[in-house]
Image (cartoon, rainbow, N blue to C red):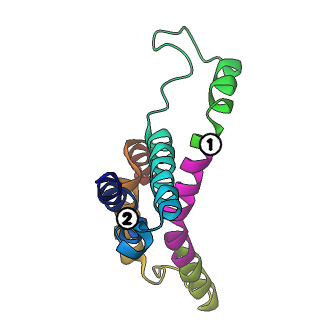
């Protein structure tokens, strides 16, 4: 019963690994079953750690920015910071690659004055969807960048 509960938990938590844990041939070997349960427990703990809110480096009523406190705070949470940077890179890589290809095509065409970049409308829609997916900080950044002077 424990192996079945762990397999169900793994299916909800880790997708493919949960499918492996529900294989009766694998569960008949106690060492493999225990390793599978251990893997699910460790993966769940890592996921929960990385998805937990970071908090703030100093109280909300602080009188000003303290770079030393911020440095200590984020150094203590380096795995979370690294995971966030990797996620940002993963989410934005495709968009940035397409944007670079569009820029190269525009340059090959001689950078015609008054002509839009290739796929400009598509990239605008993708940028909006990406900013929305990344969250409120990026929405504010996109709003600031969209102001025309």
Residue 92 seen in this snapshot: yes
Magenta stretch, residue numbers: 81-98
Q: Residue 134, labelled with which disc?
A: none
Q: Is residue 103 left or right of residue 55?
A: right
Q: Quadrant of residue 107?
A: bottom right
Q: Residue 79, labelled with which disc?
A: 1
Where residue 95 appears, as percent x and y from the top left, is 49, 71
Q: Nearer the viewer, residue 87 or 28?
A: 28
Q: Nearer the viewer, residue 35 or 90?
A: 35
Q: Quadrant of residue 76?
A: top right
Q: Height in image: 20 above or below 58?
A: below
Q: Residue shown at 66%/18% (left/top)?
A: 69
**Which residue is disc 2 drawn over?**
18
State which mark lies toward you, 1 or 2.
Answer: 2
Where residue 78 appears, as percent x and y from the top left, is 65, 38
Find numbered disc 2 in the image and state the secondary structure of the residue it sits on: helix
Taking the magenta stretch, the answer to whether it contains residue 93 is yes
Mark 1 or mark 2, earlier in chain: 2
């Amino acid at each position: 019963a424990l192996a079945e509960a762990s397999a169900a938990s793994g299916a909800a938590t880790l997708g493919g690994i949960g499918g492996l844990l529900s294989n009766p041939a694998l569960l008949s070997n106690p060492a493999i079953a225990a390793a599978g349960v251990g893997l699910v427990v460790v993966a769940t703990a890592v996921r929960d750690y990385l998805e937990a809110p970071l908090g703030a480096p100093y109280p909300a009523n602080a009188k000003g920015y303290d770079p030393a406190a911020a440095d200590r705070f984020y150094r203590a949470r380096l795995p979370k910071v690294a995971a966030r940077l990797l996620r940002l890179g993963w989410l934005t890589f495709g968009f940035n690659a397409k944007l670079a290809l569009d820029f190269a095509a525009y340059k090959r065409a001689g950078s015609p004055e008054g002509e839009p970049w290739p796929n400009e409308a598509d990239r605008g829609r993708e940028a909006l969807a990406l900013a929305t997916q990344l969250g409120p900080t990026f929405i504010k950044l996109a709003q600031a960048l969209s102001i025309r002077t």
